[in-house]
Image (cartoon, rainbow, N blue to C red):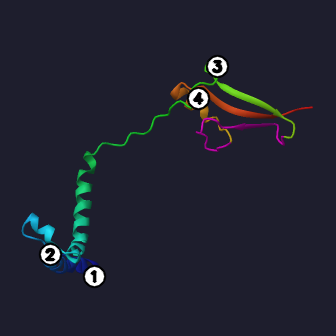
């Protein structure tokens, strides 16, 4: 049943559709087509454009992945890793580390992604650590 339907579309309906298309005899004839004739050509032109793209796609240049770049350009560059600790009296937990490399999967909390980032780029970014101030 399904194959019969596909065969009927290919053998009967597709040739009938193509015969009714307003294809001009010359390239200049395209300039004389009306808006309704262009609209009837759109499905065919869309399919041809898709097939053309799919044909040339393997030969197109691949998009390059963006390399990691430095985040810290000038702050404490003499230190191997910039880590700031701040004591806060009202902090509920003992330590909280916040990400400053923008690579953390648990952003804004640090998951130590800066270690890999620093190895790849030579950067020295580290987390911001908030510590509970003990009175």
Pointer 4 with pointer 3, Cβ within 8 A:
no
Q: SS class of the residue under badge 1?
A: loop
The CA distance from mark 2 to mark 1 is 33 Å
- For label 3, the crowd category at 10 Å Cα-Cα, with few meaning under 14, some 14 to 19 and many 20 or more, is few
Q: Is residue 81 above or below residue 13?
A: above
- Which residue is the site of mark 3? 79
Locate residue 62, reporting x and y percent.
33, 43
The CA distance from mark 3 to mark 1 is 74 Å
* Location of the C terminus (image quadrant): top right
For discs 3 and 1, the disc positioned in front in the rendered view: 3
Q: Residue at x 51, y 28 (%)?
A: 120
- Which residue is the site of mark 1? 1
Q: SS class of the residue under badge 2?
A: loop
The CA distance from mark 2 to mark 3 is 73 Å
Residue lying furthest top: 78
The CA distance from mark 1 to mark 4 is 66 Å
Q: Is residue 104 above or below residue 34?
A: above
Looking at the image, tell me whether mark 3 or mark 1 is earlier in sequence order. 1
- Judge from the rendering whether residue 92 lies leftward or rightward of residue 117; answer left or right: right
Q: Residue at x 64, y 24 (%)?
A: 81
């Amino acid at each position: 049943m399904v194959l019969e339907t596909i065969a009927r579309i290919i053998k009967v309906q597709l040739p009938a559709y193509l015969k009714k298309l307003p294809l001009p005899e010359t390239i200049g004839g395209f300039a004389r087509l009306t808006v309704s004739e262009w609209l009837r050509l759109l499905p065919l032109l869309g399919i041809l454009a898709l097939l053309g793209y799919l044909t040339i796609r393997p030969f197109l240049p691949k998009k390059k992945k963006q390399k990691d770049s430095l985040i810290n350009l000038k702050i404490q560059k003499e230190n191997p890793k910039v880590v700031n600790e701040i004591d806060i009296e009202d902090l509920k937990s003992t330590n909280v580390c916040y990400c400053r490399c923008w690579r953390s999967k648990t952003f804004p909390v640090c998951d130590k992604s800066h270690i890999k980032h620093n190895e790849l780029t030579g950067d020295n970014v580290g987390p911001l650590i908030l510590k509970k101030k003990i009175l």
